[in-house]
Every structure is written in structure tokens, then in C-alpha cells.
Image: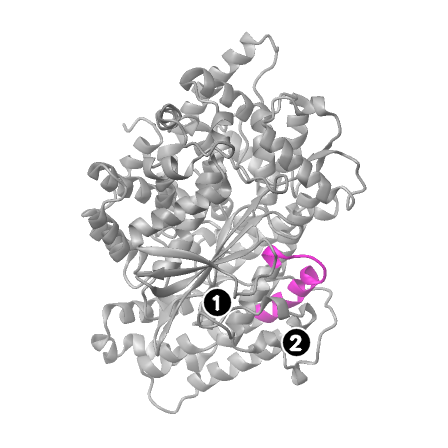
Amino acid sequence: MKLHIISFPKLCLVIAILISSSTGTSGQTTTHQDSNNMNSILLKPWIGPYGGVPPWRQVNRDEFLGAFDVAIEMTNKEIEAIANNPDPPTFENTFVALEKSGKTLNRLQTIFDVHTSNLATGPIPDIEKAVAPKMSKFSDSIIQNAKLFARIEAIYQGDEMNSLNNSQKRLVKDRYDSFVRQGAKLNDKDKAILSQKNAALAGLFAEFSQKVLSDEEGYITWIDDADQLAGLPESTVAAMASAASKLGDANNSKGKWCVTNTRSSMEPFLTYADNRALRETVWRNYYNRGDNGGDNDTNAIISAILKLRAERALLLGYKTHAHWRLEPQMAGTPEAAMDLMLKVWPKAVARVKEEVADMQKIADAENTGITIEPWDYRYYAEKVRKDRYDLDFNEVKPYLQMEKLREGMMWAAKQLYGFDFKQVNDVPVFENDVTVWEVTRNGKHVGLWVFDPFARRGKRSGAWMNAYRIQENMDSPITPIVSNNSNFIKGEPGKPVLISWDDAVTLFHEFGHALHGLCSNAEYPSQAGTSVARDYVEFPSQLNEHWLSTPEVLSKFAVHYETGEPMPQALLDKIEKAATFNQGFSTVEYLASALIDMKLHLAGNVPIDADKFERETLAELGMPSEIVMRHRTPQFGHVFSSDGYSAGYYSYLWSDALTADAAQVFEDAGTYYDPAIAKSLYNNIMSVGDTIDPAEGFRKFRGRDVDTKALLRKRGFPVD
């Protein structure tokens, strides 16, 4: 299973912005302009082609703090005007007005979020610390605005609801429920306590993220002996040399090659490097991020976050943080999510035992005298793959050029949704290696797609989708601007960037999120694009992974970087035959993280030592010693850099149950390019956003409720 970090689009409805995410910690501030005399580009509407674009090249970082003061004040006036409207509350003068509020703050937050995730250098970390309490305080002021909530409640309980269409009714109910869940009905004393906890959490989230990033950048494995590169493919060695040339001076190192502390750098090294001692070093560097003691250790922060979350849940009337988080999701309760995870867990653990036994046989045959350890798993799994399927992914990688695969996923989007992509040069970018593409359908502008593929200092690890502007269709159509962000390592100048099969899957996965945003056809921005339940949002992206392995994409776009020849059919057949290989490993490393996440947040209001909890809980679950969690607790950004995936990392499995069952529709048709099925996918899944219940949308596409047995079949696990 490919995982990622998704940064959700900030909605024009400022309430949704602030409920869903706040960043930063309280702390040192930087010098900034007087907000009373500010005329910053950050506060102005975006101008230029395509309905306006972010003014990246004109951003003055020192203006961020003052700009936030001004934008918050502007939005506050808009909210107060809605709350104090002398006319009786109506859907139009309350809900539509809220949808139109906060435009300036939304644009500012978008630009700032890109700086904190893609460009977090110089003053940005300190600015982030100062922004957090501002945004947290403002968010609470909206939720706790009694007059505003009274108008929302009046409409929710009033006769006008009967005259609204289904999406409008859903908007009213979701907004009302959200306000209640966020404490709108608390008394004044409890509201003040809640605000204090929210502000403290906002600060801790950013502090956690910054410490993990510092640990990632602080642990680099340097190599100056070519003999230590044995086993590594040429493309990986070239990427390591390129990384070393960029980082060498800054780190006062004369190493000729290096392994950076990111997944895209770590995984190929652990998969192919013959040097076991170096594999262990690289493994420990990566999986100990945030757990090395010293200034960047995150364990104390995690304990504080868990305590505050538990206290907040109790204050809001919920048994635990997990119960609070899952109430509006498809799963509904932690028990439902745990039930699905525990159905899969024992089957995955049993498969791991089989995989380890196969690997140990090969290690024993080599007379190495070793017992398989976590830093051996990927290395010996490749040997088993080659032995069992005659498939060596070193043979596959020369056919996986990043740019050609980008062309392939665009081609597939054309077949499914009628999208055409054309690179444009009239849009500002924040880095020279970022590209922008106009998306059209039948010659009509649909939106912009931004591609930021390469690792750089100050960019968080992983891969994610973001939306700079979300689609809406209220007064006039507004088209989306979406981005995909990765951390590929550049190779030698003039040569194509070759990526692993897993990275290729991730590329298609993230593009699935982008397509979800581009296909959106909702009226109100808070219901558009990826603004859906957390355990549903991964469904379109996981489904899009399937198009990578279709013969149509591989035969056209998986071409050898030297000869231009397509991947041989024999190699394609091997890939298909080995589709369920190593599913024990991938499922267990993911599920271990998901189970720890849920159990941490079901523990309630008790002191938690993160390392001890992780160690003891995994032992109780029977975690195989040869595998570690995909995201160990001290570096678990999904869960501790925001509330986003907290008690929600199970979402990938929940969504994959939908994915496996939905993919069967295409399988039964004999092609992933059936026009009628593609149209149904667009009409019922990709374009509707949150205008309908996701379960209803799935039923319309599939013709019935989800069959979770498809998930087990997809992974090659026994169904019974």
C-alpha cells in the first residue's frame, strides 16, 4: 500500500479552513511590517491568466505576520457582518455568505502553507510559530460566536430546510454538526478552556513538524568508498552522487555519495545495497527520526499532544479523541475501524512469517550466518522475488522515467475524463524546477496542475497533493489550481530521472488526488474536490494507482531510457504475476502504524510514554520483529503535525476496501478504459465532492454496498 501525506485544500469558507488545520507554535517572532500600514501583495487578489495565479516571485517573507493580522481582521469583519445581519437568517444571507467569506485569508494561508511545507528555510519556521496562536484564536472566535451559531441553528431547525436541494441540506447539516462538535454549545468558561487547549495544540503541531524535519536533514549517510556501493543500480548511485554534490559543502563533507534521510533515498539503498552494516546505518537514521534525544526529540511533544486531545474530547462530551474524530467519518466509530483492521491484521502477520521463512532460506543458502533483521527485509525480499518470479526490479527501473510516467498518467486522464494537459510558462513558480500545466476539456479551461517533483532543503519528506484554489460555481465558475509534490532525487544533468516501481505507484496515487480536485463540479467550495470524509478521500487516489499497471500505459510510456524500446511483454507478465508479492510486509508496516494511532487515541486521559506505548502495544499485537512501523510514533507526521489523520490513519485501509471493490468493475469489463464505466466514475465519485453521502456515491457506481472481501483478494490473503 502506498501512503502519502495529503495537504487538504483550504476552503473559501474560512470556518472550514480553521477547523481543518492550523499551524505553528508560540515563540520567537520575526520583524514584520506594521499591519496598520500594510500594502502587501499577500493581501491582494491573484491576478494574471486562468482566473488569477499565486504571485510567488513577489512574496516578501517578512510580510507574512503583518499580512495575517490584516487578513484576520478583514475576515473578522465579514463574519461579524453575517452574524449581526438584522434580516432573518436564510440560507443565502448566512451559509452562502459564509462560503464567500475569508477569500483574502484563504489566499494568504495557501501561500504560507506552501512555504512551510515546500520552502521551510530562513525565517519561515519562526514565522510559523507566531502564526499558529493567531489562527487558533481566530478559529475559536468563529465557532464561539453565539450570534453566528444562532443563525446557523435557526436555519438547521427551520422550515427553509424543506425547500433546499439535497446538497444545500447537506451543507447546512454538516456545518451545524461541525460547530457543535467544535464546542459551539459549551458555556463561556468551557469555551475559554477549549481555546487554550486548541492554541497549545496548534503550537505543538508545528514544533513536532519542525523537529522531525531537522532530524531528517541532520542525519545523512556519507560514502567515499566505491566498494560500499556494491549491488546498487547505476541510477541510484548517480542520484546519490548528485545529492552529495549539493549537500557536501553545506555539511563540510567530502563524501562522494550520500543517502539522504528521506524515503525515496532510503528505500532503494535498503533494497539493493550489499553492505549490510551500511544498510543498518541508513535504516536506523530513517526510523529513529524524532527519537534520537537532544533538541529534536519529539517524545515529550507527543505526550503533551495526546494529553490535550484527550482532555479536549472529554470537554466536548466524547469518551476519547478517537470517538470525537470518527463521528463524521464513513466508519462512524473507532470500533468499526478497529474491526476492519483486526480482520486483516492476522492474515497479514501470517503472510509475513511465510515471507521471512523464504528470505531466511536464501540467507542460509548464502552461508551468511545472519538472521533476518528489519534492514534485511527489502534486500532479501528482492532476492526472493527474483528467485520465485524471475523478476528483478533493477530490470524494471530503466523503463520508469519520471517524465514519461507523468505523460502516461496524463494520457490515462485523457482517456477517462477527456482532460488535455499543456505546459504553460506564463504562470509564476516558487522554484525553477516546478512546472505548470493548463488542463482543458474539449478546448475549455478546467484548471491548472502544478508539479513539484524534487527534494530540496526545507521541503518535508514524502509526497502529497495540495490545492491552491478550490473549484466553485456560485456567482460565476472558479476553476481549481492543484499541485502534486514529491521528493525524487535528481540524477546527472541531462539524464532522465529513473524512479522505483513503488515511487511510480505513489506518483499515480497523488495524481489521483489532483484529478479529484480537477474533476470537481460542485456549487459551494466547502463541498468541492477532496473536501470529503477522511476515510473516503483516499479512495479516488488509490483507485488511480491501477492505471499505472495497465498494458496501455506500460506499453506506451514505460520505455527504456537509452533505447526507447517499450518494456518487453515478458517483463510485463512477470510484474502482473508478482502483483501480490510481499503484501505481508506492506500491509503489516502500514497496519502497525494505523493500530498504534488508534490505540493511542483510545487510551483516554492517561499519561502516555510514546516509546513505551509503541513497544508494548506492538508486542501485544504480535508485531513481527523483522518489520517496523511504516511511520514510527516519534516521526508520525500524519498524526502529530495536525489533527488531520489523528485516529484516522486507518483511512487508507478503509478507502482501499472501496478501491478493491470498485476496481473489480473495470476488471469485469476487461479494460480500465471502458467509456461507460469511466463516465459513471466521474458522475458518482470524482465530480460530486461532498454534495452527497459518500456511501451513496459508491452505491451508485458499484450498484451495491462495498464488499470488503475484495480487499483481501486484492492482497492475496485468504478470504475466509
User: Where is residue 348, by image quadrant?
Assistant: top left
Q: Give the range drawn in magenta.
A: 116-135
Image position of 510 with respect to 372: above or below:
below
In percent of the image, x 53 and y 37: which residue is there? 498
Give 505 or 537, whichever is nearer the viewer. 505
Mark identifier at residue 17 = 1
Q: Nearer the viewer, residue 183 or 238?
A: 238
What residue sits right under mark 2 in the picture? 66
The quadrant the N terminus occupies is: top left
- Rendered residue at 53%/20% (across/down): 380
Q: How many numbered discs sit on the rendered protein?
A: 2
Which mark, residue 603? none
Q: Quadrant of the C terminus?
A: top left
Give whichever of 100, 420 is nearer the camera.
Answer: 420
Q: Where is residue 325 in the image (x, y as percent from the top left)?
A: 43, 55
Question: Which comes before the other along the chain, label 2 or label 1?
Answer: 1
- Asked if 634 appears above or below 186 in the picture, the reply is above
Q: Hey, what amino acid is under mark 1? A: Ile
| Type of amino acid at the residue the image marks with label 2 | Gly
Q: Is the magenta stretch mostly helix, strand or loop?
A: helix
Picture residue at 50% right of the left edge, 31% below the top: 398
Residue 37 visible in this rendered orientation of the protein: yes
Whether residue 132 appears in magenta in the rendering, the answer is yes
Closer to us: mark 2 or mark 1?
2
